[in-house]
Image (cartoon, rainbow, N blue to C red):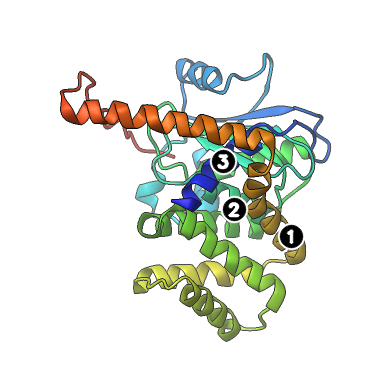
Amino acid sequence: MKKTIISTVLVAALAFQPLAALADAAVGDSIVTIGDNLNAQQREEVLRHFNAPQGVQEIRVTIDEERYYLGNSVPAAQIGNSTNSCAMVTYTSKGSGIHVTTNNINYVTPSAYESALLTAGVTDADVKVTAPFEVSGTGALTGIIKAYEVSSGEQISDDVKKAATQELVTNANLSKSLGEDQSTAVINDIKKRIATEKPQNANDIKAIVDKILADYNIQLTDQQYNQLLDTVNQLASLNIDWNALSDNLNKWAHQANDYLNTEEGQNFLNKLGSWFESFISWFAGLVGGSSDQAPAEDTNNGGQ
């Protein structure tokens, strides 16, 4: 419960941070990525959901791009034959961190996006991910990274993109059994340990994974363990600044606690408590009587 509340507060804390720049992007600049298979009406629906600025820069993401980065991580049936997920990236001040919110995404968690983006070297951005109907959201990472490259003028290597995508998928799979907070914490602690211990071979990497899992008292299935190990081996092989990544992970982890100590954070907690009280009253009435709200339809039409 504590981690869930902290994660909720983290979302609120980052939402209130002032907007600023990443690389060549100016303060508050946004860019939208649109799935190539959306029609004109769906595109307008997505832009309204994002509350995108008039004339915002748009780039397209195709199914071929998704397959290129997801091909070794996700079965072809799950990737689908169309690209539907979209993202809006707004560049924020240096040190403000990554903040991701999702809508109609039923597989990838916000924390998984945040962690994978840090791996890819995106350190400060406000990211919204959506689709016109429910999709897994695995393909959205391709669009977010593409948007970062277009706006910043910085190229991210294919090896880093593929490793970040592999991490995203592994995190999403683990979150089904471990929960969003714990799956992300495990992967990020492994990345921190890679930064400090600098493993030299597969045995060193396996020892790091085993130690972190033991610390969390987690037992994985053979399939989960092998997927995690494959992901960590891929991450460990990257030519990235591990010390910088570790610093960003530590900073990200402490942002929620820092926010709680502010007057704004305390006010938010008070509002959160009031919301919980209202929710409990509503739920008690729902259980005690009948609801006139129809169950949500399953609108998963495939694609990412």
SS at circle 3: helix
Q: Which residue is mark 1?
A: 247
Q: Earlier in the sequence, mark 2 or mark 1?
A: 2
Q: Position of residue 89 (x, y in %)?
A: 65, 33
Number of the front mark, 2 or 1: 1
Amino acid identity at mark 1: Asp
Q: Which of the two discs, 1 and 3, labels the residue nearer the N terminus?
A: 3
Q: What amino acid is found at the position of numbered circle 2 in the picture?
A: Ala
C-alpha separation, residue under disc 1 versus residue under disc 3: 21 Å
Q: CA distance from mark 2 to mark 1?
A: 15 Å
Q: Which residue is mark 2?
A: 116
Residue 61 in view, yes or no: no
> How much space separates mark 2 and mark 3, taking CA atoms?
20 Å
Identify whether 235 is placed above or below 92.
Answer: below
Residue at image mark 3: 9
Of tags 2 and 3, the one toward the viewer is 3
Q: Is residue 159 left or right of residue 22?
A: left
